Amino acid sequence: MVTKTCRPITLLTDFGQDDTFVGIMKGVILGIVPQASVVDLCHNLPSYDVAEAAFLIYITYSYFPDQSIHLVVVDPGVGSPRRPLLVATDNYFFIAPDNGVLSYIFERGGLRRVYEITAKHYFLSPQSATFHGRDIFAPVAAYLSKGIDPEALGSEIDDYVKIPLPSPQPVGDRAIAGEILHVDRFGNLITNISHEDLARLLGKRGEARLALRLGETIIEGLRSFYGEGEKGKLEAIIGSSGHLEIFVNQGNATVIAKKRKGDQLMVSLLS
């Protein structure tokens, strides 16, 4: 069981692996809490892509123990007046810039309190205007892991930034329109249509078949696992995130479909 004084920390950034940014943040954390457990979620996000980071932290945070601290640094406004935030939900903590990167958490994560981090004596000094991940977010995460109460780190606010979330839209009672939110390293196209969205579309018509239209391509039915798909052919599946994916068995759906993040799709009932 995780205790108040050994909260794990996860890191999600757009810093990549070619520079020392991530390693330095870990060094700051370990300098404050040598026994800290630090987990890399991902560091190869598209640079400055707040929306994609928001989706990825949403589909990953709940797999960690209660009281874990999720540190998200995708921060195109670094050095500006944008605020550093600490968010407390029913079971987790999130630390991030106030730029909308926690929008899914605000909407669906069991939100309890949001704090503007103002306790500068917990920051590194002096602070760089270009590396708040090192000077503000990492040390605050470390002190929170060490057992500092959130109230000691700042003041509660309710005017935090939220970005519009692309939600699936019903089209009559027999179809739903969605959008590609993420392309993983295998070229799978992950959409904003969840398993629950499809269940609502089917309603009591549990035996009905679904057709997915992606541009000029129509995909009929859902596969149960990747290997069930015909090689070289676009297929659909409910992936590990609980969202509808378009994939190619041992291939790259992005290349074959010539689609990317932000492109639209439609799922409809065949019968």
Image (cartoon, helix red, strand yellow):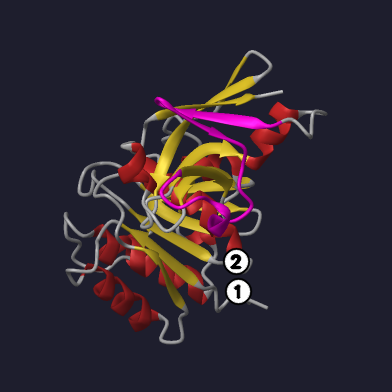
Q: Residues within 10 Å of mark 1 (few under 14, many from 20)?
A: some
Q: Quadrant of residue 83?
A: top left
Residues rendered magenta in the picture: 209-233
Task: Please tell me which residue is depicted at 54% across the width and 56% down the height of the picture.
Answer: 226
Mark 2 vs mark 1: which is more N-terminal? 1
Q: Which residue is mark 1?
A: 4
Q: Which residue is mark 2?
A: 67
- The kind of residue on which mark 1 rests is Lys
Q: Nearer the viewer, residue 255 or 200?
A: 255
Is residue 122 something one can see in this rendering? no
- The kind of residue on which mark 2 rests is Gln
Q: Nearer the viewer, residue 42 or 66?
A: 42
User: On the picture, is 99 further left or further right than 198?
Assistant: left
- In the picture, the quarter occupied by the N terminus is bottom right
Task: Please tell me which residue is depicted at 69% across the width and 16% down the height of the picture.
Answer: 173
Asked if residue 221 is among those painted magenta in the image, a careful observer would answer yes
Work out whether 83 lies above or below 4: above
